[in-house]
Amino acid sequence: MTSRGFKATARTSSEARAVARTQTLIKGMNGIGTVRKTVLPGGLRVVTETLPSVRSATFGIWAHVGSRDETPSLNGATHYLEHLLFKGTGRRSALDISAAIDAVGGEMNAFTAKEYTCYYARVLDTDLPLAIDVVCDMLTGSLILEEDVDVERGAILEEIAMTEDDPGDCVHDLFAHTMFGDNPLGRPVLGTVDTVNALTADRIRRFYKKHYDPTHLVVACAGNIDHNKVVRQVRAAFEKAGALTRTDATPIAPREGRRALRTAGRVELLSRKTEQAHVVLGMPGLGRTDDRRWALGVLNTALGGGMSSRLFQEVREKRGLAYSVYSYTSGFADCGLFGVYAGCRPGQVHDVLKICRDELDQVAENGLSDEEIARAVGQLRGSTVLGLEDTGALMNRIGKSELCWGDQMSVDDMLARIAAVTPDDVRSVARDILGQRPSLSVIGPLKDRHAARLHDAVA
């Protein structure tokens, strides 16, 4: 059955096959870790990484669409659509989709971010053809029926309520709004109660057809797999849906973005009756293509990325003012964020903020010691490798790299880039990032009268 998202034409499959282009992006030793890429007609990219030593495979499809692509009235549409693609196709019901993967002991899920969406299944290597068929069917054959939209609306509203009940999670959405304001990057990925209630099946279908064209998609697969077999199976699934009929289409380029408005010295307080106050103190960071991101990664690790980090030692170990305290970075196409999170008793929030601000200022002015930087480099190199020990992580790496950078970097090259970071590189990026005036987001049982003292943390 031809899906509602794609329209078949009279062009034959043999004509389509003639324009498939394959290249090896990373040459692994004895085939292990080899990354290959094929561009199919219609602009669909298939990227794989071979790991013969495992018995699993993870198959995913990445879509070049996130909450950043939504208008204010469509806020939440990308995430809503993520839910709806599990609700049924012309070949399978919602139960058929989940039962097919459950029957082979596999795992299937999806996630929506601000600049992309991913659908994936992890199965035994022998069950990979089933996973490919199911996930491809979901992406090309979703019906998006009005009754499913109405039913799923309730589940999404519950998800929004669940997030709002977790202030440690919600404060990061608040911080994005603090930094970006009423800009697509400042709006929540889930949308709001009002925008979700206003979305209709017809609007979501139009959004689906616009953003799920094969030129906007990247297929990624990692594990004990054969690249050519994966390509054939993906091609067959998309051709069945009438999705690979254009031989002149080219893949969409990595997102360049439109530089979002960022603010400094802004404070947002959301008063709630919680046991802890949850705070994020931060400033603009780096875009994901900025060459300084490697130095920023080392800085982030040393400042708040582990138990030996400055913030953990000063806030938790020495003073016991918080159980959870860390720093983090978020990189987008054209900008980024650097933030410090802490959760503490409301009466200690001002002390915690002062310590965090003092540490940021000290590192901005004086930098980190060579010992701290060396330890952070080692920690970052180790965590990078350990984080790629399963096929799901490998699929995420190659899929996101193709979609966001249009290129692949081997693990050895990544480790070399981290090892090449010098103390001067870290001190320079510390001055550039931490030397900016921060903004602050707070959720907790604080009143407006506390706002003046909160502003002291960003003065």
Image (spheres, rainbow, N blue to C red):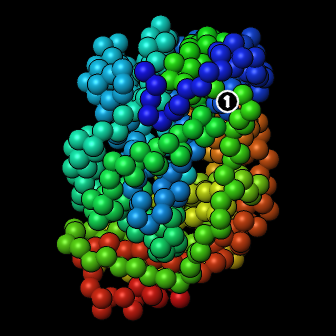
The residue lying at 56 percent from left, 20 percent from top is 239
Nearer to the camera, 396 or 213: 213
Location of residue 168 with respect to 89 vertically, above or below: below
Can residue 281 be seen in this snapshot?
no
Label 1 sits on residue: 246
Q: Secondary structure at mark 1?
A: loop
Quadrant of the frame with the N terminus: top left
Across and down, in percent, residue 53 comes to 58, 11
Nearer to the camera, 132 or 438: 132
Q: Is residue 191 left or right of residue 164?
A: right
Location of residue 372 with respect to 245 vertically, above or below: below
Give the quarter of the image for residue 444: bottom left
The residue lying at 36 percent from left, 88 percent from top is 451
The residue lying at 49 percent from left, 75 percent from top is 181
Across and down, in percent, residue 107 comes to 37, 25
Nearer to the camera, 400 or 152: 152
Across and down, in percent, residue 103 comes to 30, 13
Can residue 9 be seen in this snapshot?
yes
The residue lying at 65 percent from left, 68 percent from top is 259
Give the quarter of the image for residue 442: bottom left
Give the quarter of the image for residue 11: top right
Location of residue 405 with respect to 31 vertically, above or below: below
